[in-house]
């Protein structure tokens, strides 16, 4: 008898929990975005006869409940703390914390992806650069797992093999090694990217290889934005001290004009309106963009640079601007290689392919 009462009580409590959660979700105010996860959240699905009959409404509603569940961030934190602490898991959905840094596991090395990236660089050279008087370079930006993962007992991709494949297969370009110019301290603790104020040695290596070190002043005023909660902060879902974004400016950078081909608008090098957006890192050149140019009216040279880049390039590009009259930034994650000829005239520019290991190991995104 007691066992029967206990079972009924459990059933009732569970039913009340499910029904209560359903009712709360119906009246709980919906959020459009999750700032901690850097993504848009599912909204309440439109109720139609067709959607109810074919079952799609319940599927969409389930996704809505998961995204909009009350105190969702707090539940995510409890789950993460249990994973790391109570269950002694080394990672939580691929996110791990070590030496005060949070990162995402990236392994193993996808050799086919590296080979595809090499073919992409070679094809771009043959398509646009082979017949011109270009100085062409490429480099590899190590993601912070290079300094963090293996040293703390986590699996790590074979970075040496990645470098070997590119060096053996990328032709007609000079390789600029950057691995030894960086340390873990040069990266944000809660984000993927490197910190601009830590790139002096990296810029020096690029400038020396490309022959423009004499055109750099290296005189900047350091500005800061705080607090900065990077992309991994939300994914880790555990309390961590925020980062600070430092950005370097001077009179030359303040006079530079950025033209965005997507918005057909001009902006400054540092778009301070982005600080209050979903990702404050977008203050560097306004964030992701398929094609943009930066004009330097105070340049003491007529040299131009074409920079094929990913998001790491947004923060290092301003430190190269002094050396060129014009810098064109190309992101072929968002535009096809074949369409470049419709916008750019390739004629005697310096060209630098600058991608992180995250892109080389997932090169399908290069179009």
Image: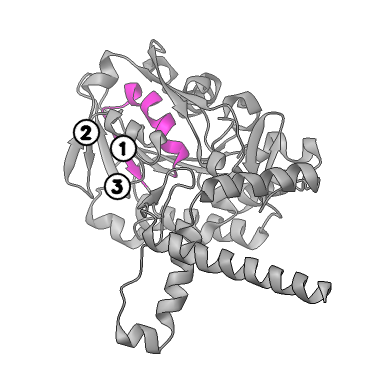
**Residue that label 3 marks:** 291
- Label drawn at residue 286: 1
Q: Position of residue 342 (x, y in %)?
A: 23, 57
Q: Residue at x 49, y 47 (%)?
A: 37
Q: Is the C-beta separation of discs 3 and 1 under 8 Å?
A: no
Q: Quadrant of the N terminus?
A: bottom right
**Residue that label 2 marks:** 267
212 falls in the magenta region: no
User: Closer to the camera, 331 or 232?
Assistant: 232
- Mark 3 or 1 closer to N-term? 1
Question: How many angstroms separate mark 3 from mark 1 (CA)?
Answer: 12 Å
From this viewpoint, is residue 224 visible?
yes
Is disc 2 surrounded by few (<14), some (14 to 19) or many (20+) residues within 10 Å? Answer: some
Is 312 placed above or below 318 here? below
Disc 3 versus disc 1: nearer the observer: 1
Q: Position of residue 124 (x, y in %)?
A: 42, 55
Colouring scheme applied when the structure was drawn: one colour
317 falls in the magenta region: yes
Is disc 1 surrounded by few (<14), some (14 to 19) or many (20+) residues within 10 Å? Answer: many
- Mark 2 or 3 closer to N-term? 2
Question: How many angstroms separate mark 2 from mark 3 (CA)?
Answer: 14 Å
Q: Residue at x 27, y 17 (%)?
A: 252
Q: Position of residue 132 (x, y in %)?
A: 34, 46
């Amino acid at each position: 008898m007691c066992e029967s009462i206990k079972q009924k009580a459990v059933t009732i409590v569970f039913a009340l929990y499910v029904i209560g959660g359903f009712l709360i979700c119906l009246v709980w105010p919906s959020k459009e975005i999750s700032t901690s996860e850097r993504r848009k959240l599912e909204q309440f699905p439109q109720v139609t006869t067709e959607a109810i009959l074919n079952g799609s409404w319940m599927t969409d509603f389930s996704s809505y409940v998961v995204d909009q569940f009350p105190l969702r961030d707090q539940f995510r934190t409890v789950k993460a703390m249990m994973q790391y602490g109570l269950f002694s898991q080394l990672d939580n959905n691929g996110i791990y914390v070590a030496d005060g840094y949070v990162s995402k596991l990236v392994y193993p090395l996808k050799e086919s992806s590296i080979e595809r990236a090499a073919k992409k660089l070679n094809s771009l050279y043959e398509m646009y650069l082979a017949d011109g008087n270009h100085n062409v370079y490429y480099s590899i930006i190590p993601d912070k797992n290079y300094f963090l993962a293996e040293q703390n007992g986590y699996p790590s991709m074979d970075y040496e093999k990645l470098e070997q494949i590119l060096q053996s297969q990328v032709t007609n370009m000079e390789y600029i090694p950057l691995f030894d110019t960086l340390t873990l301290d040069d990266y944000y603790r809660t984000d993927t990217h490197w910190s601009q104020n830590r790139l002096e040695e990296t810029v020096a290596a690029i400038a020396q290889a490309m022959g423009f070190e004499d055109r750099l002043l290296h005189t900047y005023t350091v500005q800061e934005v705080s607090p900065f909660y990077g992309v991994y902060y939300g994914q880790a879902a555990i309390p961590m001290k925020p980062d600070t974004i430092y950005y370097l400016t001077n009179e030359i950078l303040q006079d530079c004009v950025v033209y965005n081909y997507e918005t057909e608008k001009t902006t400054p090098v540092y778009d301070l309106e982005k600080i209050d957006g979903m990702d404050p890192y977008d203050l560097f050149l306004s964030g992701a963009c398929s094609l943009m140019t930066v004009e330097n009216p105070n340049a003491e040279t007529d040299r131009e640079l074409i920079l094929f880049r990913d998001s790491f390039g947004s923060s290092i590009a301003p430190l190269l601007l002094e050396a060129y009259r014009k810098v064109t930034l190309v992101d072929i994650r968002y535009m096809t290689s074949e369409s470049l000829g419709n916008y750019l005239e390739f004629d005697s520019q310096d060209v630098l392919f600058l991608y992180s290991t995250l892109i080389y190991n997932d090169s399908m995104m290069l179009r």
